[in-house]
Amino acid sequence: MIATAGSQRRWRRIFLVVGAIVAAYALLAPLSSLDAAQSAGIPLLTDKFWFRIATYVVMFVVLATAWNIIGGITGYAAFGNVAFFGIGAYTTGMLIAKAKWPFLVALPLAPILAALFAALVGLPLLRLRGHYFAVASLGVGVAVGELVQNIDYNGQPVFGGASGLFLPIYAVGHRGLFFFYLMCGAAAVAIAVTWWVLRSRFGYGLIAIRENEDAAAVIGVNTTAYKVAAFALAAALTGLAGGIFSQWNVFINQDNTFPIEYNVQMILMALLGGTGTVFGPAAGAVLLQLLIQFLGGSLPISFDLPFVSSEARPIVARGVIDFFGGRTRLSLSYLRRSLRDTSL
Amino acid sequence: MNTAAQPQLELRGVTKRFGGVGAVDDVTFQVEKGEILGVIGPNGAGKTTLLNCISGVHRVDGGDIRWEGRSIAGLPPHRIARLGIGRTFQIVRPFGSMTVRENAAVGALFGSSAARRGLKEAFEVADQVLQLVGLKAKADHPVSALTIPDRKRLEVARAVATRPQLLLLDEVMAGLNNVEIDEALEMVRAVHATGVTVLLIEHVMRVIVGICRRAIVLDFGHVLAEGEPEVVLRDERVIKAYLGERYAKRLRGERGQDSAS
């Protein structure tokens, strides 16, 4: 155990260095004149499409890092955090589209409303433990999405209904760049908050709850208050990402602000990078989101992996997800099963 | 009210039922400040349930628990801990991802004292407590590297770090060998010497006789006997509860012969 602590530190250092280089490149590449970068043949982040991918990646850094506070540090496997993303998106979206608020004034209300909602549902929900909490939180996540789409007043959908909500385009010089940096700012806040939590009395209380809630209570940790606070903090950060998303994407509906798969993705990312750590979920988010974009074939450029035909891509994707999800060891029998299931 | 005569902890008719079973039934006793009180009883007598009631883990169904004259029945566990009642669990519950030192420090970070401690002071307290229970040398070990006796020490260390005025120990000697029991006894004496009242649940009679001046015997949730350990352990009702009626009769016969000869 003590021996692994040293190798853990070494890995952490390697990850930090690599992460710092990637982050610095991502942040600085667009700053050096865009045309110059293009003519120099640097593909990353110079055209609109890449900004979109990069902003998505950073958005998931926020989501995974936020989930880590309740799921990783406190040990409560929240499966419905997408509700906070959607609430954040719709808060900002409604304020801009209906109340005509300026974006930067409407944005701070996204985290506030998401946190208030989390505190409200957290009080009953966080009395459940283990799978019970996971399933109940998933239910809340789905329910909020349905409510937002279906609430009517005088026969009119309050939140845009099934046709969604259109926001005016935010007038700013380079929109792609602006929202990419804004999302990076949110990610920085999320990581800084995690860093602070892990070094505070609050964080020690949360870890104590994760390790043994009864023992935490009898040494004087107000477990209910701490759990709700952690839930609300995660919700605030998730809601912030949602708020940025709504103005960035200009159009929001149930499908793009309450996607159930986000719930699973942010958890997988945190697990992949290392739950309970400061940078782990961020690293996991970058890796997995890039992988999802590559293997999902959502790129316009042909990004065929060498030696892998496009038909075989789903198999590779499944293998990667199963392996990192800890569900299998990669073996011949697994490959055979995988081939049979995808009926190639 | 005369505070000198007031017991530190007072249980009045405390009752806890699980369904129809009265795990703790109308239990009344007092704990005086500064004493070491033993609570013994056969398996299932309600000892641990009693501790759970005092520490707020269970809500009592009847009766009252008074801490320094104030009722604490119904308070949540963290409030009771902050009043100055610390406890250990029979099955140790360390914070597995932390080091030994961090475990103790978390106790110090929260715990009883109204004055909030910063991280640095908490770790200083942790070091003092680890010294006291004899875990100083293993302060930076992960919990998983500890032996069972050391885990029991850690359980005590974390509770002591909360700076309790009353410490409830739930079978800290169970599963230890004779040498380890002697060491653990030393530890309890050392903690007691710092001015902490101790309420001790124990199966090992040697422990009770060794450090308690007073013992309470529970059986089927009732207080069966109360008094000096040596006297209580010779009480026929206690022997019957532990060893059965037949054995008690036989013992009575032998004693009769002893006094006759």
Image (tube, rainbow, N blue to C red):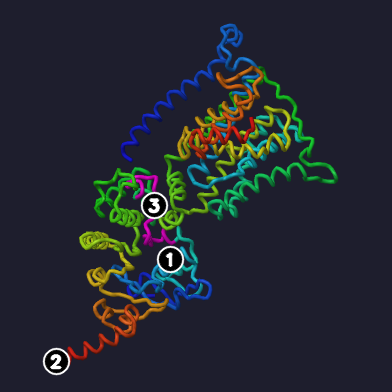
Q: Is residue B100 magenta?
A: yes
| Residue occupying the point 73% across, 45% down | A147
Q: Is residue B62 left or right of residue B218?
A: right
Extent of the magenta region? B80-103
Q: Residue B261 got which mark?
A: 2
Task: Residue under label 3, please give it.
Answer: B115
Identity, as a three-letter code, of the amino acid under mark 3: Ala
* Viewer-side residue, A290 vs B15: A290
Asked where in the image residue B66 lies, by quadrant, the reply is bottom left
Q: Residues within 10 Å of mark 3 (few under 14, many from 20)?
A: few
Number of marks in the rendered image:
3
Circle 1 chain: B
Q: Give whichever of discs 2 and 1 has the lower sequence position.
A: 1
Residue A243 place in picture, x, y as percent: 65, 34
Task: Residue under label 1, please give it.
Answer: B52
| Residue occupying the point 53% across, 28% down | A287
Q: Separation of disc 3 and disc 1 at Cα?
A: 26 Å
Identity, as a three-letter code, of the amino acid under mark 1: Asn
| Residue occupying the point 77% across, 44% down | A150
